[in-house]
Image: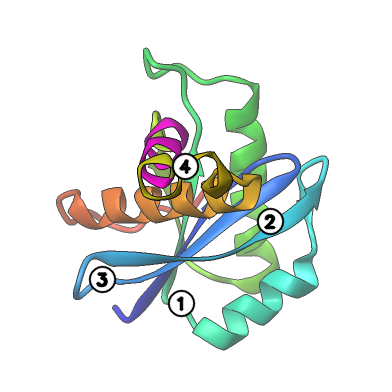
Amino acid sequence: MSSVMAFDFGTRSIGVAIGQAITGTANPLAAIKAQDGTPSWELIAQLLSQWQPSLCVVGLPLNMDGTEQPMTARARKFANRLHGRFGVAIHLQDERLTTASAKEYLFERGGFKSLGKGAVDSASACLILEDYFRQPSEPQAKA
């Protein structure tokens, strides 16, 4: 597996990260603005064309007890559309606490100035992707 792209779905901003499975590391890319959860599919097409990921990991927002919430269905819908439009393999990854961890990480390095919405979303996408890399190998799941 070469590169893997991750998305932290949100209704106004979608964080994006790119990583390499061989190193298990991820780097943030610019977040994508969204209108009520709908991104610029053209911009996503450009990212997929540029990075050629073999897999896209989409964060799945769950409640702390593991149950689903309204955003869970919206993230699944985004993942399904990503697969349907571009034919990329999709894996849904539990994203509990990634936003809080991303904010803490960014604040430690740059204070309040580093906590811009896009920066937090893309840092969250990095954490989602790194969590995916750390889990035991399993078959890729389509959304």
How far apart are the alpha carbons under marks 2 and 4?
A: 36 Å
In the image, residue 110 above or below residue 10 = below
Q: Which residues are magenta?
A: 99-106
Q: Nearer the viewer, mark 1 or mark 4?
A: 4
Q: Based on the picture, tell me whether residue 136 belongs to the magenta stretch.
A: no
How far apart are the alpha carbons under marks 3 and 4?
A: 30 Å
Q: Residue at x 68, y 81 (%)?
A: 46
How far apart are the alpha carbons under marks 3 and 2?
A: 24 Å
Q: Residue furthest top?
A: 65
The residue type indicated by label 2 comes to Arg
Q: Which mark is residue 53?
A: 1
In the image, residue 67 above or below residue 20 = above
The residue type indicated by label 4 comes to Gly
| Residue 84 point in image, percent of width and height | 66, 63
Marked residue nearer the N-terminal end (1 or 4): 1
Q: Nearer the viewer, residue 136 or 43?
A: 43
Residue matched to label 4: 111
Q: Which mark is residue 131?
A: none
Marked residue nearer the N-terminal end (2 or 4): 2
The residue type indicated by label 1 comes to Pro
Residue matched to label 3: 21
Dot 2 alpha-carbon crowd within 10 angstroms: few under 14, some 14 to 19, many 20 or more: some
Residue matched to label 2: 81
How far apart are the alpha carbons under marks 1 and 2?
A: 16 Å
